[in-house]
Amino acid sequence: MRSHLLNDTTAEQYRRSVTEGVERVAAKLVDTQRPFTGVTVDDLAPVIEQIDLDRPLHDTTAVLDELEDVYLRDAIYFHHPRYLAHLNCPVVIPAVLGEAILSAVNSSLDTWDQSAGGTLIERKLIDWTAARIGLGENADGVFTSGGSQSNLQALLLAREEAKTEDLGTLRIFASEVSHFSVKKSAKLLGLGQDAVVSIPVDHEKRMQTVALAHELERCAKDGLVPMAVVATAGTTDFGSIDPLPEVAELCAQYGTWMHVDAAYGCGLLTSLTRRALLDGIERADSVTVDYHKSFFQPVSSSALLVKDATTLRHATYHAEYLNPRRMVQERIPNQVDKSLQTTRRFDALKLWVTLRVMGADGIGQLFDEVCDLAQEGWKLLAADPRYDVVVEPRLSTLVFRYIPATVTDPAEIDRANLYARKALFASGEAIVAGTKVNGRHYLKFTLLNPETKASDIAAVLDLIAGHAEQYLGDSLDRAS
Ligand SMILES: *Cc1c(COP(=O)(O)O)cnc(C)c1O
């Protein structure tokens, strides 16, 4: 069994084994014709069920053959130009290279004595990101597992900075289309049921700052504590960006922590044409960025940035066995002092290799391309009488629904759209997402693949219309 340990004597086996895996994936990339096979849970569950984990195969090739059946064949492939569903990007090769290196070396970024150079690389990437945001000289931050964790940590810092024992009085203000991790975080942080105040959005799905001002005023009048405003820079559904300068003004006026959730919109930090959409983000107290969404990085790769490095102390605990207090005096950099995690992946390496190979402009160019594509898609949808499209995209999402010429019952239109999404998924030809707008079912394209063409969007719209028409035709038959 020792031959499986990665070390000096097994270097050749390591090379062979990983290369064999890389070859399988490479072959898959070439072969894959559709984003999905359309396999069902009922098809796949028994295949995985019948594998006896207590009877190993002892042979890498056999295991890879088996993996074809249990995973590779039916995986959802985000690199396919007709994967249009969630905020998953195709990944760039330098980042995958970084991933292979970081898991083999297996640094853990909690303490210097488990990561050495890795700590400094992560710190440099944090400084780089903070500088792109414009957070100033005292900024800091840490890599996290994802936007949800970044939001949680941001709100933890905001809660501590609010300096009140009475958690029931704390209020967080976020738009009605903010990410659900804001509410989850409030719960985890022990805040009351009513802690998150939902602020209505305008017709472009941006937070209405008049309503925010009103709620902040009411909060003060009621003797409650405005703990944080969460402005979203790139809402998950619409890619809409809350008016950051106005939110910043109100936060300054009411002494409230300003958090910007740029999990999606962070790609704009490298954009060559659209960086101005983030104007005002530099005034934030904290910012969430998900490199695994708009920087074309593999999951996971995310960070929380803060304007004032000292606020990260709210996540600091010392343990004799790991990061004793004296290490701070000795100026030994232990990233665990800033993190909610202890053992932590060296995800920063992926971004490092990406920036060293492609440069930030390379990332920005790819993100700009998908935003341009969304504009084209919007024009297609706006000109297509079969569809209703919600808002002109700022980033790269399109929310729309099929509207039949002959049917007016909204519930029936809902069912036709739900059916079309499911039927498309089952066909594996393309994958789209869904959401609700004003209580009605809509479909969504999240465009993060620069290889997707306007012709793909047009083709998928035809497929959706075909499924929806089939549903409506069948339901007419059922009625008669
Ligand atoms: C995706 C997303 C999150 C959550 O990020 P994860 O990496 O999935 O945890 C938070 N906020 C917004 C706006 C997002 O789009």
Image (spheres, rainbow, N blue to C red):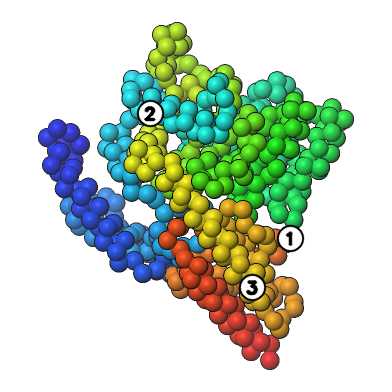
Position of 456 relative to 18 (above/below) = below
Instruction: State the separation of the CA atoms marked 2 and 3.
Output: 48 Å
Q: Which quadrant holds residue 188?
A: top right
Q: Residue at x 49, y 55 (%)?
A: 369
Residue annotated with mark 3: 383
Q: Residue at x 67, y 22 (%)?
A: 161
Which dot, 2 or 3, sits closer to the camera?
Answer: 3
Which dot, 2 or 1, sits closer to the camera?
Answer: 2
Looking at this rendering, what residue extends furthest in the bottom direction?
Answer: 480
Instruction: Tell me the kind of residue under disc 1.
Output: Asn
Which dot, 1 or 3, sits closer to the camera?
Answer: 3
**Residue 309 visible in image:** no
Q: Residue at x 43, y 31 (%)?
A: 125
Label 2 CB less than 8 angstroms from ligand 1: no
Residue annotated with mark 2: 121
Label 2 SS: helix
Depth check, front residue: 107 or 188: 107
Instruction: State the separation of the CA atoms marked 1 and 3.
Output: 22 Å
Residue annotated with mark 1: 438
Asked if marks 2 and 1 touch (Cβ < 8 Å), the reply is no
Asked if marks 1 and 3 touch (Cβ < 8 Å), the reply is no
Q: Quadrant of the C terminus?
A: bottom right
- Position of 66 with respect to 83 (left or right) is left
Provide residue 94's location: percent of width, then percent of height.
33, 44
